[in-house]
Image: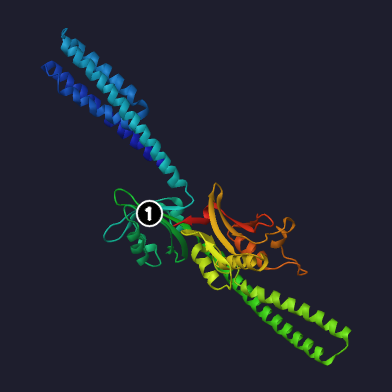
């Protein structure tokens, strides 16, 4: 179909160029017989511009051939007039220059059009050109993916109002208000209604073209949203099961501790009492483990978000008792993309310094932008961490040889691809370095 239309269009253009050539030569021949040589040669601009624009690869050659024809026609009438010959040669130079320039511009224009058409037709997103008319914004052009997204074909959608396919017609008004001439819109989520009535969730982006039309890009996120909902429901159920299991464990441990206390009051045998004391210690350990997991029951349950680090640290320090310890965060304007439990990260790091740093009097939190992202430093002036323990402090030990706090710190950070390590010098203080990827921070 396209090749047939292209062939028909090419034939019509060739006929029009040929007709304009005939008219130009006929008019100039008549003018030369009548002695008119200064105005009629301008008629040659029409076939030169048309040929160079429609057939740019042959435009220069065409203008040169036409110029030579004009020269051959003019020379017999010159009668040795040097002025006429010079004027004719000057016009020839202009004709060839115009043909070359228009051909070059037309080739550049076609290259850009081919790039645009390639992006438009081969994009994995649905692309629409919408004319924002007063009555209804109508679709002027749509690619194959966009038509398939609406359950139709491209030719049947031309002229249709885009609002016909919106589950909420008011969404277009909101979108159009945001698409101002100097601003584009990204990440606008809405729901489409296909011709067969099926709802499709999409994420829309758009911008306004210089002529007022709107270019709209739609990406189908129905499968992603369904997967997110399923994952969210699964996390909710796992969270509920964890809560119920934790409550059962706490009840069982509390009952066990009561039985141990009863045994301690009934038996005076030193061996029995030592045995009961060891059982009580084990029960207390289980109790502490269960209590710690309460703080992390929502880990990964809510989606990550941008969080102002200065505010997070200030809220954490307001909840901690830190006698004689000064916490100084220097992270104003820094936001990081992290799990909502980010506050537990700095709660544990600050508490860890206060508890294990011994002579800690100051904790300083700073950051540094690097080529591969950003590093947040948490420094204290305590005793530091021995070289052999730098990695072990983040590990979970089943036998209770380590704490859960720093283990969970690493787990919380890993949700958004952040990492943590300890790099301080033993005896000079601890230094925790949190590496944030390039897309995980912003300065506001």
The residue lying toward the viewer, choosing from 124 and 144, is 124
Q: Is residue 53 above or below residue 397?
A: above
The residue at the point 15 percent across, 9 percent down is: 81
Residue 287 picture quarter: bottom right
The image position of residue 308, as x and y in percent, is: 49, 63
Identify the residue under disc 1: 184
Is 42 on the left-hand or right-hand side of 123? left
Does the image show residue 293? yes
Is 42 on the left-hand or right-hand side of 360? left
The residue at the point 73 percent across, 84 percent down is: 252
Is 134 on the left-hand or right-hand side of 219? left
The residue at the point 41 percent across, 43 percent down is: 116
Does the image show residue 307? no
Q: Is residue 220 above or below residue 82?
A: below
Q: Is residue 75 above or below residue 170?
A: above
The residue lying toward the viewer, choosing from 404 and 232, is 404
The image position of residue 145, as x and y in percent, is: 46, 53
The quadrant of the picture occupied by the N terminus is top left
The quadrant of the picture occupied by the C terminus is bottom left
The residue at the point 38 percent across, 55 percent down is: 157
Among all residues in the image, which is located at the extreme bottom? 266
Mark 1 secondary-structure assignment: loop
């Amino acid at each position: 179909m396209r090749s047939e239309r292209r062939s028909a269009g090419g034939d019509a253009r060739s006929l029009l160029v040929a007709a304009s050539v005939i008219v130009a030569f006929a008019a100039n021949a008549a003018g030369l017989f009548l002695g008119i040589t200064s105005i009629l040669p301008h008629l040659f601009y029409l076939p030169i511009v048309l040929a160079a624009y429609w057939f740019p690869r042959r435009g220069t050659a065409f203008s040169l051939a036409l110029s030579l024809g004009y020269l051959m026609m003019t020379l017999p009438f010159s009668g040795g007039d040097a002025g006429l010959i010079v004027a004719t040669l000057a016009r020839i130079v202009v004709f060839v220059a115009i043909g070359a320039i228009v051909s070059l511009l037309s080739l550049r224009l076609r290259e850009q059009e081919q790039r645009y058409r390639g992006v438009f037709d081969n994009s994995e997103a649905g692309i629409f050109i919408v004319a924002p008319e007063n009555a209804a914004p109508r679709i002027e052009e749509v690619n194959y993916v966009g038509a398939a997204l609406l359950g139709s074909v491209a030719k049947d959608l031309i002229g249709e109002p885009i609002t016909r396919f919106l589950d909420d017609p008011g969404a277009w008004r909101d979108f159009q208000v945001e698409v101002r001439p100097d601003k584009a819109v990204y990440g606008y989520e809405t729901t489409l209604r296909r011709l067969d009535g099926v709802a499709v969730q999409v994420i829309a982006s758009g911008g306004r073209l210089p002529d007022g039309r709107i270019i709209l890009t739609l990406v189908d996120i129905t499968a992603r949203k369904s997967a997110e909902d399923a994952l969210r429901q699964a996390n909710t159920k796992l969270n509920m099961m964890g809560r119920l299991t934790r409550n059962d464990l706490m009840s069982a441990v509390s009952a066990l501790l009561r039985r141990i206390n009863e045994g301690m009051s009934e038996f005076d045998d030193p061996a029995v009492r030592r045995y009961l004391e060891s059982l009580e210690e084990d029960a207390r350990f289980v109790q502490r483990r269960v209590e710690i997991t309460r703080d992390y029951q929502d880990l990964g349950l809510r989606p990550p978000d941008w969080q102002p680090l200065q505010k997070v640290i200030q809220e954490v320090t307001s909840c901690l008792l830190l006698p004689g310890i000064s916490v100084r965060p220097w992270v104003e304007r820094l936001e990081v993309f992290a799990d909502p439990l980010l506050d537990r990260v700095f709660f544990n790091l600050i508490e860890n310094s206060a508890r294990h740093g011994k002579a800690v009097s100051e904790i300083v939190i700073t950051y540094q932008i690097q080529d591969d992202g950003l590093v947040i430093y948490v420094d204290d002036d305590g005793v530091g961490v021995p070289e052999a323990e730098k990695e072990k402090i983040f590990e979970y030990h089943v036998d209770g040889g380590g704490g859960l706090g720093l283990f969970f710190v690493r787990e919380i950070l890993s949700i958004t691809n952040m990492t943590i390590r300890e790099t301080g010098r033993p005896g000079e203080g601890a230094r925790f370095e949190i590496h944030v990827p390039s897309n995980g921070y912003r300065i506001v």
